[in-house]
Image (cartoon, rainbow, N blue to C red):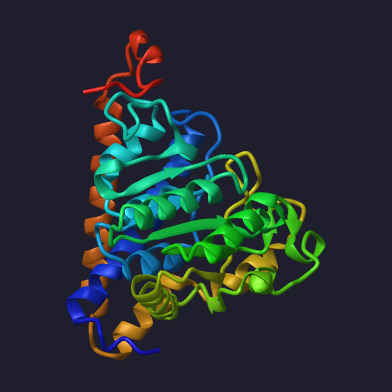
């Protein structure tokens, strides 16, 4: 794992980002159980290395498009945890004024262009953003995150074909957590190696250990270089694992996997793996890590307090933000 491009301070910042996502999601599960969060809620616990590693490899001006498991990507892109929690609570100070909820985070100020609930439906949107950037000769690129279930949709193949044909500055990142809802990937895909599903489009394909932050980062850095220099797209399969159920309506392990399987993957936890590497490299001490964790926990508690005190949207908000208003 080559991390020579990162300073000690930057490595600690990346560790903190993963901790922030983990603690945010744990608190979201708690608040959902208490009835403070309604609707669907899909948690990112176990997959933090992908969002943090990939987004750390792009510039703040670049864009990110995600699916319904979007909390981690939104936070890694720099969104305020208070506004993110308020959105989950359905409050007016949320990222989308409380009208988007868990699956529809959106933060224009950070370049996070949304979570989308239709499986695979956001790939053409991300491809369109990349086309717009090329058409207007802008320097930004697009990261598009999706699960392995999306590769079975027509939108996936159409998007990769057009991105390759038109040489668009986009990086497709498949977060393969092995299960589409309760169906294992080997029962849903004719190829177990998901990255090979993109072999018909003449773009760079790669399979990456999605539990290793530095491997994710290095892979995306190279993809970013390709996108910026030649506007060539890439398709990266990040192999990861979600510890929780598909959503909060799904038991933690469900009836489709064993507790032993989950515990096996937890031994390769992305946060602990990166933390131990930093300990070994004398970048951080155990006491510093504990302090960092307490600082993150305090920030999450402040986010919950902010969400609790934010009012619900007034009724007239129902008809706002439906159409683009000319200025």
Q: Position of residue 150 (x, y in %)?
A: 64, 54
Q: Is residue 16 left or right of residue 45?
A: left
The mark total stands at 0
Quadrant of the snapshot with the C terminus: top left
Dividing the picture into quarters, in which one does residue 276 lie?
bottom left
Q: Is residue 41 left or right of residue 327?
A: right
Q: Is residue 106 visible?
A: yes
Q: Position of residue 148 (x, y in %)?
A: 64, 60
Dividing the picture into quarters, in which one does residue 278 lie?
bottom left
Q: Is residue 289 left or right of residue 271?
A: left
Quadrant of the snapshot with the N terminus: bottom left
* Residue depicted at x 33% and y 71%: 57
In the foreground, 175 or 25: 175
Furthest-top residue in view?
316
Dividing the picture into quarters, in which one does residue 319 lie?
top left
In the foreground, 11 or 271: 11
* Residue depicted at x 34% and y 71%: 228
Q: Is residue 239 left or right of residue 151?
A: left
Determine whether 57 is above or below 215 in the image.
Answer: above
Q: Position of residue 58 (x, y in %)?
A: 31, 66
In the foreground, 298 or 61: 61
Q: Is residue 72 visible?
A: no
* Residue depicted at x 59% and y 72%: 265
* Residue depicted at x 21% and y 57%: 295
Q: Position of residue 97 (x, y in %)?
A: 33, 26
């Amino acid at each position: 794992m080559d991390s020579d491009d990162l300073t000690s301070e930057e490595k600690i910042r990346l560790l903190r980002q993963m901790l922030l996502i983990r603690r945010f999601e744990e608190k979201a599960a708690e608040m959902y159980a208490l009835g403070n969060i309604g609707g669907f809620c899909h948690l990112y616990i176990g997959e933090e290395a992908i969002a943090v590693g990939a987004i750390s490899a792009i510039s703040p001006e670049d864009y990110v498009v995600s699916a319904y498991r979007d909390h981690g990507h939104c936070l890694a892109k720099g969104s305020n945890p208070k506004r993110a929690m308020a959105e989950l609570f359905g409050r007016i100070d949320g990222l989308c004024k409380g009208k988007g909820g868990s699956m529809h985070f959106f933060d224009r100020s950070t370049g996070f262009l949304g979570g989308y609930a239709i499986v695979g439906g956001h790939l053409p949107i991300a491809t369109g953003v990349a086309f717009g950037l090329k058409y207007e000769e802008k320097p930004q690129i697009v990261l598009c995150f999706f699960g392995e279930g999306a590769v079975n949709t027509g939108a996936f193949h159409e998007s990769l074909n057009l991105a390759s044909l038109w040489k668009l500055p986009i990086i497709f990142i498949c977060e393969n957590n092995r299960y589409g809802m309760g169906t294992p990937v080997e029962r849903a895909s004719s190829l177990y190696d998901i990255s090979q599903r993109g072999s018909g489009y003449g773009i760079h394909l790669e399979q990456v250990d999605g539990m290793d932050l530095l491997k994710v980062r290095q892979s995306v850095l190279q993809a970013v270089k390709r996108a910026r220099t030649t506007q060539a797209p890439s398709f990266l399969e990040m192999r990861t694992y979600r510890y929780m159920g598909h959503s909060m309506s799904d038991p933690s392990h469900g009836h489709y996997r064993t507790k032993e399987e989950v515990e096996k993957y937890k031994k390769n936890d992305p946060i602990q793996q990166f933390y131990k590497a930093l300990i070994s490299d004398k970048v951080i001490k155990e006491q510093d890590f504990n302090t960092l964790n307490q600082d993150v926990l305090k920030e999450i508690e402040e986010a919950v307090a902010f969400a609790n005190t934010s009012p619900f949207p007034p009724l007239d908000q129902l008809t706002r933000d439906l159409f683009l208003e000319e200025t």
